Image (cartoon, helix red, strand yellow):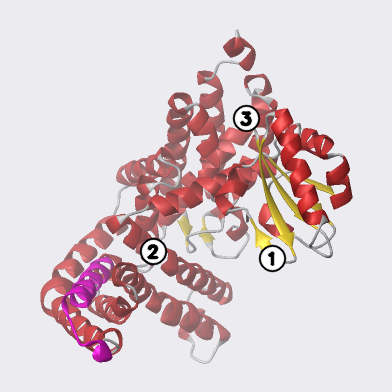
Amino acid sequence: MKKILAVTACPTGIAHTYMAAEAIKKAAEGKNVEVKVETRGAVGVENALTTEEIAEAHAIIIAADTDVDEGRFHGKPVIKASVNEAIKNPGKLLDEAVNTKPTAQDYIAQVQKTKAERSAQRTGIYKHLMNGVSFMIPLVVAGGLIIAISFIFGIEAFKQQGTLAAALMDIGGGAAFALMVPILAGFIAYSIAEKPGLAPGLVGGMLASKIGAGFLGGILAGFIAGYIAKWLKDSIKLPKNLEGLKPILIIPFLATLVTGLLMVYVVGNPVKVIMDALTNWLSGLSSTNAVVLGLILGAMMAFDMGGPVNKAAYTFGVGLLGNGIYEPMAAVMAAGMTPPLGLWLATLLAPKKYTVEEREAGKAAAVLGISFITEGAIPFAAADPFRVIPAIMTGSAVTGALSMLFKATLRAPHGGIFVLPIPNAVGNLFMYTIAIIAGTVITALMVNLLKHSKAVAEK
């Protein structure tokens, strides 16, 4: 049964608003259509449509003569009419809504719904880590691109004090990148203990940066600060008139002190040794080992398309940017683009193997792919996991391996093709593009090789 949503509103918000709503409901009963109607009358909004309901709806009927906030229905087929038309011909409006064909915007809305559901399902350590990463990413993007722009004036032009290149390097490297690890740690702690965890998390992250423990030290600092702050919040009991001192004085002071001492005397130096070893290993990778690392990172990006495995590979690439290692990030982004791009190409190469809706969805998948939104492959994978997932993993693994083999670099952890034209944002741009194209083609060929045509499947 298709679910139809409706909104009714008239200028006075008294009679016609509710008459139109009642007419649509009665017509829906006769047609065996599930419907929910939001009324925007004189008393305000009643029976409001939720984000989840909008995401699940097949189409929206707007029977209104006033503004109804249409922006929330982006990506859904919308049938517009006056309230009088809804009162007189509700059946016609319902038929039109039920018979609307899915569009590329529907596909994008489905992907957005899946991403929202995944975010809501995050729990525990993974949730806290992703909270920190999400706040860190804008700094890395901005900093990386500003540093890349500084290189337009010459790779070492920033060393000349007082120049624009030097100013850009100060902004990108001296400020944005310097805040990367403290923000990561601070918002991991914030996710665990809320506001009382922020100060100790930021301080712990700053100490990790100063010690040289890098993003691994920042992650540990965030969890240490967060759980210490949470324990103090739950354990310290004060009279009600003194409770206000806990979040602004007692917890920040004690948690910052303990976290700081642990980072300086216990955690920081061992993690620095690990981080230095990792950096040296990555910097000295042979071609063979680089290809193997690219294969692994690429396959991880496609395995669950935005899930925990995908995010582990992505976080690894982002974290290394602060240490001046840019090859893994390039492999990760390229491999994350190829699954939806490959599925789009598959629908073009063998249209008979796909329904009209799937071919339309392929167009949307292309847009998501060039934007580095790996989740664009999820609806295809959910419909046929045993054929689609192995195919996209193969394509992404090849892309990741080629990117590492070509020593392509990427200074910004997001943006898809939109960062490629920015000077110096991508190293070895031509071969990097070849890697993405190769993975896209392999994905498409594998998917079509494994898939039966719709005509055969229906028999």
For residue 321, what is the image quadrant? Answer: bottom left
> In the image, what residue type sits under mark 3?
Met
Name the one closer to the observer, 158 or 234: 234
Q: Residue 224: image x %, image y %?
A: 20, 70
Q: Taking 126 as reference, is 113 left or right?
A: right
Q: Residue 299: image x %, image y %?
A: 39, 39
Name the one closer to the observer, 212 or 2: 2
Q: Taking 132 as reference, is 436 left or right?
A: right
Question: In the rendered image, which residue does mark 1 sit on?
Answer: 44
**Dot 2: few (<14), some (14–19), or many (≥20) neighbours within 10 Å?**
many
SS assignment at label 3: loop
Question: In the rendered image, which residue does mark 2 sit on?
Answer: 131
In the image, is residue 317 above or below residue 228?
A: above
Q: Which residues are magenta?
A: 219-242
Q: Earlier in the sequence, mark 1 or mark 2?
A: 1
Question: In the rendered image, which residue does mark 3 sit on?
Answer: 1
Q: Earlier in the sequence, mark 2 or mark 3?
A: 3
Q: Are marks 2 and 3 in contact (CB under 8 Å)?
A: no
Question: Is 236 part of what is drawn in magenta?
Answer: yes
SS assignment at label 2: helix
Specify whether residue 205 is in view.
yes
> In the image, what residue type sits under mark 2?
Asn
Q: Residue 202: image x %, image y %?
A: 31, 79
**Dot 1: few (<14), some (14–19), or many (≥20) neighbours within 10 Å?**
few
Q: Residue at x 76, y 42 (%)?
A: 24
Q: Residue at x 46, y 57 (%)?
A: 409
- C-alpha separation, residue under disc 2 versus residue under disc 3: 37 Å
- C-alpha separation, residue under disc 1 versus residue under disc 2: 35 Å
